Image (cartoon, rainbow, N blue to C red):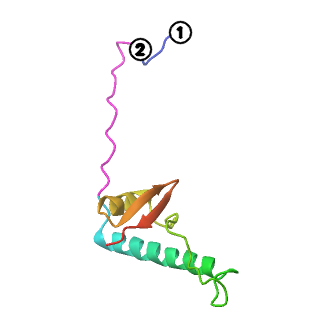
Amino acid sequence: MNDPTNDPDVPQTPASPEPVAEPPSKEELRLAMKAFRKRLKLMRLDDESSLGYGPMSSGNSSQIGAIRPPDQFPKEIWRELENKGKIRREGGGLYSIVES
């Protein structure tokens, strides 16, 4: 069989380099962080609304510290926020807010 990829007479084209993605803008990072904080707040409120958290019980607060980031933003934004020290990767796709 004649394989054109090993044929020395067929010119080999070099693999085209992948385009370098530009870093997310400050506005995108700000909106992503705002969405992350809102989702964390809602998850905590939802957890505290269940039985056992009311003023007539032990009064515990939510133990949710890490969440999966909102899907409407790409992974690159979450990596950039992690590199900037705004959020911390907790494993399993979860992130938490870095306390200042």
Residue 21, percent across and down? 32, 53
Q: Quadrant of residue 61?
A: bottom right
Instruction: State if disc 2 and disc 1 touch (CB < 8 Å).
Output: no
Residue 8 drawn in magenta? yes
**Residue at left offset 44%, top offset 17%:** 4
Q: Main secondary structure of the magenta part?
A: loop
Residue 100 drawn in magenta? no
Q: Quadrant of residue 10?
A: top left
Amino acid type, label 2 = Asn
Range of residues picked out in magenta: 7-22
Say which label, 1 or 2, has the lower sequence index: 1
Amino acid type, label 1 = Met
Give the distance between the C-alpha atoms of the residues marked 1 and 2, in whole angstroms.
11 Å
Q: Please tell me whether residue 74 is drawn above or below residue 20 in the rendered image.
A: below
Most distant residue in the top direction: 1
Q: What number is the disc on residue 6? A: 2
Q: Which residue, given by chain and number where applicable, does mark 1 sit on? A: 1
The crowding category of the residue bearing disc 1, from other C-alpha atoms within 10 Å (few below 14, some 14 to 19, many at least 20), is few
Task: Please indicate whether residue 98 sits to the left or right of residue 36 in the image.
Answer: left
Of 44 and 59, which appears nearest the observer?
A: 59
Of 10 and 15, which appears nearest the observer?
A: 15
Q: Secondary structure at mark 2?
A: loop
Of 58 and 82, which appears nearest the observer?
A: 58
Q: Please tell me whether residue 46 is drawn above or below residue 84 in the rendered image.
A: below
